[in-house]
Image (tube, rainbow, N blue to C red):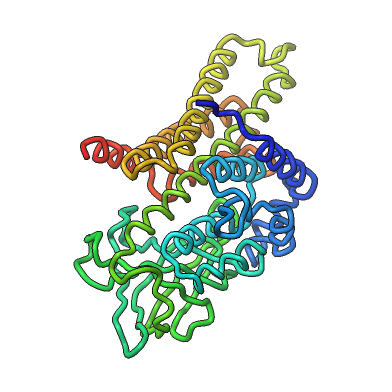
Amino acid sequence: MNFEHTEDRRMLADSLNRFIAEQYGFEARNRIAQSKEGFSQAIWQQFAELGVIGALFSEADGGFGGAGFDVAVVFEELGRGLVVEPLLGAVMAGEAIAVAGNDAQKAKLADIIGGTTVAAFAHDEPESHYELSRVQTRAERSGDGWVLDGVKAVVQQGEQASLFVVSARTSGSTDDEAGISLFLVPANTPGLKVRGCPAIDGGRVAELTFDNTKIGGDALLGAEGQGFDALERAIGRGVLALCAEALGAMESAKVATLEYLRTRKQFGVFIGSFQALQHRMADLLLEIEQARSAVINAAAAMDADRVTRERALSAAKFSIGRIGTLVAQESIQMHGGIGMTWELPLAHFAKRLVMIDHQLGDEDHHLQRYIALSRA
């Protein structure tokens, strides 16, 4: 199998890399990440104009990419620049709409791709612990519509989102795969409360509280109680995106560490000449290549059967979690005390790598899931 990127993907990667280097430097990124909005609307619009959002969607859905490798290319470059704009929400919410939506609902994808709608995916709950089928938020029929009650936690850029894809249980017990439904909920819906806070690695997250929140019958995505497949596919796209983002962050940490070893002197010589540090750096480079292989394997499996796809995604997320933490630790240690200072970009890359492990399932969760899928 040929894993070389097409010319279009290489051009996209080069354009995005150049844009981030010129418009999204470390100081600019920190100002955006620590702002009250949590991301830049201007940068978001520029991503739309550059076709970055469109690359995450297929031509049938109004984009010009949509394959696993398209997602991987985009998010690897985003990871290199620690970009906080809400592309993860776009790719997950967009996938759910594309998989389960009717024609009227799919029409909303054009606004997401055009950057006029910020979409967020609201599935995690305070007690879910990464389990996809553990949904306590309830949706009850009321006349021609629905009433939602429950809480969603850690919704990326939820304060600025204008549209949410929300999972809720319409039947069954808390852990059943059957009985989960997906809904499109506008942010201005009465009875929906959004409470935001800063994320530890930059940007902002929100908690959504649904208190007797009434939505129309046209809010239901797909068939009632049969949303698990679309939910799994949307989360899977998010897992691939996070793995590719982590790979980009690892590359930036690697480059910074190599540069430090080549320029920092101790006892009158460059510390990169010390054999012990050379061995540690060589081990790190091998681990990063292993992470790249895992991302490639996951991207290639996105159109495979369900078990093959989900196994590849869990294998990649497990590898990324382990290797990302190792890269964060080793890079900081080889920098010494300066590696912990906020003025140095490395500390921010290290924090992001550690936090990616805890998004959409940590390494322990995905190792167990990989084992379970291997027995299927």
Give the image location of residue 296, x and y in percent: 50, 33
The foreground one among 92 and 32 is 92
**Position of 160 relative to 128 (above/below):** below
Q: What is the number of callouts on the image?
A: 0
Splitting the image into 4 quarters, where does residue 269 fall?
top right
Quick one: 163 or 104, which is closer to the camera? 104
Percent x, y for residue 228? 32, 59
In this view of the protein, which residue sits in the foreground, 274 or 33? 33
Snapshot quadrant of residue 343:
top right
| x then y, percent, for residue 369 | 29, 42
Residue drawn at x 22%, y 40% as measured from the top left:
376
Seen as rendered, the residue at the extreme bottom is 143
287 over 33 or under it: above or below: above
184 relative position to 202: left or right:
left
Q: Residue placed farthest to the right in the image?
A: 22
11 to the left or right of 319: right
Q: Quadrant of residue 374?
A: top left
For residue 371, side relative to residue 35 (left or right): left
Residue 34 at x, y percent in the picture: 65, 58
Residue occupying the point 67% across, 62% down: 35
Q: Residue at x 52, y 30 (%)?
A: 292
The structure residue drawn at horizontal position 56% and vertical position 70%, both measured from the top left corner, is 108
